[in-house]
């Protein structure tokens, strides 16, 4: 038992304490969180816009009068469907490589490329989540907004979207957690994130167990913290309804 403890202690020192290698993981964690937060903002913006277009099409296409407005709605809905099909139908890893090696091949900013890729990917899933929330809101809410003098966009933004997000908050929280874990592949495009830091340490020390277990534990702790935060928000929103 003593020999095993001594070996674990030696491995811990070699992988994290010696040459301050834990600094690599600390800086990598910062990069991972920056990518996640940036992608989250992009994903929510894209998701809200697409969900508005898709839900507007679903709710009004049968009653919209023929004309330029209806043609425009059909056109944008078709674009949104193509975007959703392509993004949801291909792995995010492949999308990351395509953007890095083809679309933005002239850029050396791996952090920006990773953030854009994960944001665009997340936007497709957020769009469908929010669209489901919008479709679940009673149609009388739209009529109530219009009766108050709001136009369609104002009613959507001020009345429908807040209710929809409240309804789908657990699904959005799950998407955020999934997004955080997906960023672990950013190292494939030369981003020095948390996973890249662990790979770097493993390459120096030739020890796989300690760095990889540490990586798993860090992600586990962050995910559990996020679950706690979102749980508190969800309970508060439920309380505010009464």
Image (tube, rainbow, N blue to C red):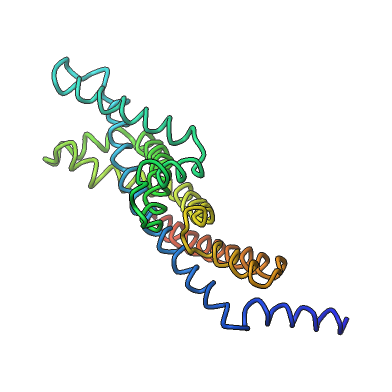
Write the residue at 31% across / 28% down.
79
162, 32: nearer the viewer = 32
92, 218: nearer the viewer = 92
Q: Position of residue 113 (x, y in %)?
A: 38, 52
Quadrant of image for the N terminus: bottom right
Q: Position of residue 221 (x, y in %)?
A: 58, 67
Q: Position of residue 61 (x, y in %)?
A: 26, 21
Residue 185 against residue 98 in the figure, above or below:
below
Quadrant of image for the C terminus: bottom left
> Hey, which quadrant is residue 203 in on the image?
bottom right
> Hey, which quadrant is residue 127 in on the image?
top left
In the image, 69: left or right of 223?
Answer: left
145, 39: nearer the viewer = 39
210, 179: nearer the viewer = 210
Q: Position of residue 36 (x, y in %)?
A: 43, 58
Residue 115 against residue 147 in the figure, above or below:
below
Write the residue at 43% across / 55% down.
238
Write the residue at 64% across / 71% down.
204
């Amino acid at each position: 038992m003593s020999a095993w403890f001594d070996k674990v202690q030696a491995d811990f020192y070699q992988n994290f304490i010696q040459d301050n290698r834990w600094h690599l993981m600390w800086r990598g964690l910062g990069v991972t969180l920056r990518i996640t937060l940036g992608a989250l903002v992009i994903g929510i913006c894209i998701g809200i816009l697409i969900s508005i277009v898709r839900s507007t099409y679903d709710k009004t296409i049968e009653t919209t009068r023929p004309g330029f407005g209806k043609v425009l709605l059909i056109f944008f809905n078709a674009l949104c469907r193509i975007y959703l099909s392509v993004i949801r139908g291909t792995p995010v890893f492949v999308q990351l490589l395509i953007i890095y090696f083809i679309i933005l091949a002239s850029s050396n900013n791996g952090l920006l490329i990773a953030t854009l890729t994960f944001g665009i990917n997340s936007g497709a899933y957020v769009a469908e989540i929010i669209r489901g929330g919008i479709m679940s809101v009673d149609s009388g809410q739209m009529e109530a907004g219009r009766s108050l003098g709001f136009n369609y966009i104002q009613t959507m933004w001020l009345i429908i979207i807040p209710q929809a997000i409240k309804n789908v908050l657990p699904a959005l929280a799950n998407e955020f957690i999934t997004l955080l874990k997906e960023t672990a592949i950013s190292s494939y495009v030369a981003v020095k994130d948390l996973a890249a830091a662990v790979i770097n340490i493993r390459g120096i020390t030739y020890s796989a167990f300690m760095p990889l277990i540490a990586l798993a534990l860090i992600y586990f702790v962050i995910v559990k913290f996020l679950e706690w935060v979102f749980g508190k928000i969800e309970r508060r929103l439920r309380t505010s309804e009464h």
